[in-house]
Image (cartoon, grey):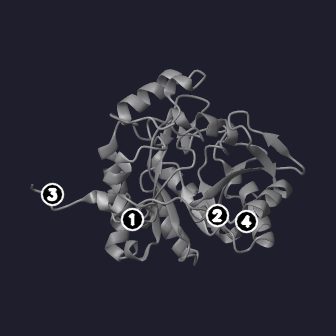
């Protein structure tokens, strides 16, 4: 009787063998804890769309960070909710801005914790968009200067890594240049290289008070149905790094933002096409990975269902 020459089951027969060859392992070292900082003292404001999560004043945030570090969580991702908003989101790059204050406070108490800071304007602008608005349109190039100022300000406050999440064309190159000019050459960038205009961001927009006051973000964030466009976005964003050899040094990460958490088909295509480290945004499904669209409540339900159907064909829901 003929036998197959290759028997993959040999590596599945024993639990220790399966453990030895497991390709993906989730450990505490892989976790980044998102936190929302607000002004005041003793503030621990529940976020209705994220049960168990809070907007925290800096004194409360420091307590939370100490607990997280005690559990072995290596990094936090800080978002800020300003005291006041204006058309240019000026608190985002202010020396005494809420995130800048939070970074210094955390570093004073837990200096070895990795601090990643969100670089965007939406939660700081009175109009809720991620860039400068002129004549009802979001202006790309004038926004780059402000994003660069935000990144430099946060890095000077002590941030270990900056994470631009806006999706303006050319923002990573502008931020890299500004950091280098400020003698912050060792500050890495976690680029939201492929960020979708996703309905899954609804709870986050509530948490950060960052919903647009007019229109939506589809003119600058991607269509959730476009996986190939994600590859092009990442390639464009990393082209300059390849030319100067920095990519090989691991100076930049690619962030696939607002994908449905369990979807590994798109991630695999990115792994095959791009030799860069990757992560999935913590708000990809706002803590409800595997939940069917019809279980979501609220006005975005049809959009959520269409996004899953258009962007992730053949996806098996994992409960």
Q: Earlier in the sequence, mark 4 or mark 3?
A: 3
Residue at 15%, 62% in the rendered image: 5
Q: Which of the two residues, 31 or 105, is positioned nearer the viewer here?
A: 31
Disc 1 packing (10 Å; few <14; some 14–19; many ≥20): few
Count the marks: how many? 4
**Which of pointers 3 and 2 indicates the residue nearer the eye?**
3
Q: Which of the two residues, 224 or 284, is positioned nearer the viewer here?
A: 284
Q: Which mark is residue 301?
A: none
- Determine which residue is flagged by label 4: 69
Disc 3 packing (10 Å; few <14; some 14–19; many ≥20): few
Specify whether 6 is left or right of 290: left
Specify whether 79 is left or right of 19: right
Q: Is residue 227 visible?
A: yes
Q: Which mark is residue 75?
A: 2
- Disc 2 is placed on an element classified as strand
Q: Earlier in the sequence, mark 4 or mark 1?
A: 1
Q: Quadrant of residue 225?
A: top left
- Disc 4 is placed on an element classified as helix
Q: Earlier in the sequence, mark 3 or mark 2?
A: 3
Residue at 35%, 67% in the rendered image: 240
Q: Which of the two residues, 274 or 246, is positioned nearer the viewer here?
A: 274
- Disc 3 is placed on an element classified as loop
- Determine which residue is flagged by label 1: 21
Q: Quadrant of residue 238?
A: bottom left
């Amino acid at each position: 009787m003929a036998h197959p020459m290759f028997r993959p089951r040999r590596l599945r027969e024993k639990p220790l063998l399966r453990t030895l060859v497991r390709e993906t392992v989730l450990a505490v070292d892989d976790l980044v804890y998102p936190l929302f900082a607000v002004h005041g003292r003793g503030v621990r404001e529940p976020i209705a769309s994220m049960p168990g999560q809070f907007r925290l004043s800096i004194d409360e945030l420091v307590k939370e960070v100490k607990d997280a570090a005690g559990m072995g969580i290596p990094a936090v991702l800080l978002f800020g909710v300003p005291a006041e908003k204006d058309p240019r989101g000026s608190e985002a790059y202010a020396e005494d801005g809420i995130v800048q204050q939070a970074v210094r406070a955390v570093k004073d108490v837990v200096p070895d914790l990795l601090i990643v800071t969100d670089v965007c304007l939406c939660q700081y602008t009175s109009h809720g968009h991620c860039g400068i608005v002129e004549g009802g349109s979001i202006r790309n190039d004038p926004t780059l200067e402000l994003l660069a100022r935000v990144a430099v300000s946060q890095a000077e406050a002590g941030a270990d890594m900056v994470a631009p999440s806006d999706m303006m064309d050319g923002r990573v190159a502008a931020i890299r240049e500004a950091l280098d000019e400020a003698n912050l050459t060792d500050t890495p960038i976690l680029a939201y290289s492929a960020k979708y205009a996703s309905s899954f961001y609804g709870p986050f927009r509530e948490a950060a008070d960052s919903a647009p006051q007019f229109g939506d973000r589809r003119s600058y964030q991607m269509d959730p149905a476009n996986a190939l466009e994600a590859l092009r976005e990442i390639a464009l964003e990393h082209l300059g790094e390849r030319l100067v050899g920095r990519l090989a040094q691991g100076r930049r990460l690619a962030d696939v933002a607002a994908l449905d958490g369990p979807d590994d088909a798109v991630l695999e295509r990115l792994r095959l096409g791009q030799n860069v480290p990757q992560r999935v945004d913590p708000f990809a499904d706002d803590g409800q990975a595997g939940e069917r669209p019809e279980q979501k409540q609220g006005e975005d339900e049809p959009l959520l269902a269409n996004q899953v159907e258009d962007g992730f064909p053949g996806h098996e829901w994992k409960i």
